Image (cartoon, rainbow, N blue to C red):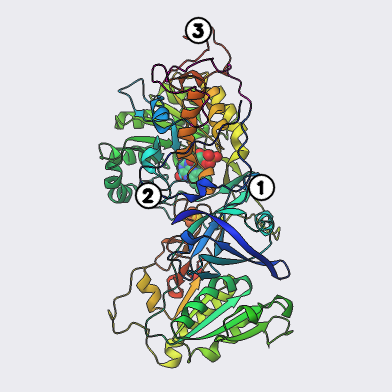
Amino acid sequence: MRLAAAELVDSREILPDQWLQSYYAPSLVAGARAGQFVHVRTGDYSGLVLRRPFSFNTVDSATGVFTIHFRTIGRGTEWLKRVRQGEPVDMLGPLGRPFEVDSRSRHLLLVAGGLGMAGVRMLADEAIRAGRQVVLLFGAATAGEVYPSFLLPDEVEYVVATDDGSLGHHGYVTDLAPQYEAWADQAFACGPSPMLRALAGLAAGRGQRLGVAKLGRKRGAGRSAPLGSPEARRKAFLQVSMEQNMGCAVGACLGCVVMSVAGTPQRVCREGPVFAAEEIAWESGW
Amino acid sequence: MRPRKRVVTSPAGGTILPARKRKPGRPRSRRPSRLPPLPQGRSLVLEGSGATSPRRAEPSATELAAVDLSVDLAPGRGGFRLANPILVASGTFGYGVEYGEVVDVQRLGAVCCKGTTLKPRVGNVTPRVTETPAGMLNSIGLQNPGVDAVVERYAPTWTAWQTSVIVNVAGESIADYVEVCRRLDGVPGVAAIELNISCPNVGKGGLQFAIDAEAAGAVTAAVRRTTDLPLLVKLSPNVADVRPIARAIAAAGADALTAVNTLSGIAVASDRRRPLLGNVFGGLSGPAIKPVALRVVYEVAQVVDIPVVAIGGVTELADVLDFLAVGAVAVQVGTAIFADPTLPVRLIDELAGECLARGLSSYQPLVGTALPPRPDAPSAKGVEYRP
Ligand SMILES: Cc1cc2nc3c(=O)[nH]c(=O)nc-3n(C[C@H](O)[C@H](O)[C@H](O)COP(=O)(O)O)c2cc1C
Ligand code: FES
């Protein structure tokens, strides 16, 4: 965790009201992994008292440049989109815990809903660099909000669903997931919570349907990894990147929790944002 | 006041803080001072030190360190001396360890840890925080692992610190408060107790201790009998008249008062179908509450003889100076840490720099300057208490 003045390199509106910005900040990029995030401070004169969290969308450790992807939904993001090239932005990161890919996983299924793309986008790069195969399922309301394929690595198989059927599958992205459950060794998702809940439901029944046991069966069979631990995520078929309103983003304020199956609230900013789907108490109403 | 560059010293921990060099946005504005103009010539501190004029843009770390920022928060009994009057507020700085890598905790006046209860608490349903104009609402619901776990997990770390840790204590009955404080008494690493009395009192049908002078006095007295640890009691602003409550707490043996806790408020969800926070009600904090906190400190400082620590919307040196002027001897920084974790440490240097610039060897003369003169006051400026 470091504080840095990240310098805006490039800012583009890639979709209506959706921005892709590149920042130069070698100290934030160093050691950053897919699933982690930065906590961004708006200008002193913005009148805003909280930072805004953004996932690392892509990271280029060679150049020290990373990107964030956001929709303008309020005064913070309106401020951010107006940052000019060369201007420094105060950021805290890398924060949170990353996705954990089991070393034996060859086939990764990534599922993103809308802006959830920003949560899994970097994992596609990491996986391809490691020689893994990636299918990325993406859901949006309509064709006009579909993440442009040219911004994805060529190696990714990109499958789209739209609510109105204007592009790809007519329906939810979760409708597409079952076709890949046998192919995938592990799945990683980020998006609206009904989407994550539906995927968690699918993942829970997968072992039975396919007659396969959980990953990591050999290592420490029967012993479940501690809640929130990297092993718990690595062993899980489905890992989800959760969202919650944040204050500090370092684990100090307890503003950002989600309820775990053990009945103990977990901090999205510290134990998360990535959790094994089976760690989350989906029906708790939290 | 003339413009002055921001004072920067390198933290002892050697943390790299490149953000300090170039911060986005305009430089912070300083409001014109209400204090007497700068004395001409050399300041008290610099006398004979061979240093250059006090108008120097950036005092050295040695010069800053020469200013006496220490403060005693329990002058009535034994003393509870802090190296400086900049504390971090309960609930905004965890147990002091979370920001470790970016904040030099050792420099802080003290750390007030998250509210601690007898039994573990899971807290309120989410959402728990939301931003509001110049502030935020929170309804954490006192999530904490319980006093025994807090002692076990964190006290060993605190013992090694030079910074004092003040454990913020919450409860639902006087017996709860007493038992938590009994378990904290004598624990190495626990320097003091801050009673969070903005909690429903089960014994009185859920009426908050903080809005009931009798209950506030009773819980303070009960805890006072339990422990010799320095005892701070935190006032709620959600009352019609805070003065009788402050008096009752002081009379019951508190060493200091801290003011204020959050203001009760709500926000509405964007679909306008329900309140936004899972718990409906939340506590408002941040710059939005500063005028209220100033008013409470102003009122309280005039009716009690024990030190008052101000809390509420501190985001820059001007806020610290304002709170000192209305009678606070120290301040706690809360919500502002979320945006600017290095603020509290910077404020320490800025306060020292302010004293140097005014030719003061300590910040004591800045305390109480805006209070009305009192006929029975021991000093010409009407400062009842001197740190
Ligand atoms: C997220 C959050 C959690 C808090 N938790 C506590 C707590 O546990 N006990 C307490 O006495 N005050 C708590 N407070 C209140 C603060 O300590 C402080 O009194 C208040 O935020 C006003 O100061 P500020 O405007 O600088 O934030 C909390 C405040 C916030 C924002
Ligand atoms: S945002 Fe403060 S604990 Fe997660």
> Residue B376: which disc?
3
Q: What is the span of residues highlighted in magenta in the rendered image?
A: B32-58
Magenta stretch: includes residue B71: no
Real-space CA distance between mark 2 and mark 1, rounded to the nearest whole angstrom: 29 Å
Residue B376 at x, y percent in the picture: 50, 7
Q: Give neighbour class at mark 3: few <14, some 14-19, many 20+ (Cα, 10 Å).
A: few
Question: Where is residue A143, by image quadrant?
Answer: bottom right
Real-space CA distance between mark 3 and mark 2, rounded to the nearest whole angstrom: 45 Å
Residue that badge 2 annotates: B97
Residue at image point 30% right, 43% down: B158
Secondary structure of the residue carrying numbered label 1? helix
Secondary structure of the residue carrying numbered label 2? loop
- The front one of A162 and B243 is A162
Residue B335 seen in render: no
- Labels 2 and 1 positioned on one and the same chain: no
Position of B263 relative to A87 (above/below): above
User: Badge 2 sits on which subunit?
Assistant: B
Secondary structure of the residue carrying numbered label 3? loop
For badge 3, the amino acid type reads Asp
Residue B236 seen in render: yes
- The front one of B315 and B289 is B315
Pointer 2 and pointer 1: residues touching (CB < 8 Å)? no
Question: Where is residue A267, by image quadrant?
Answer: bottom left
Residue that badge 1 annotates: A46
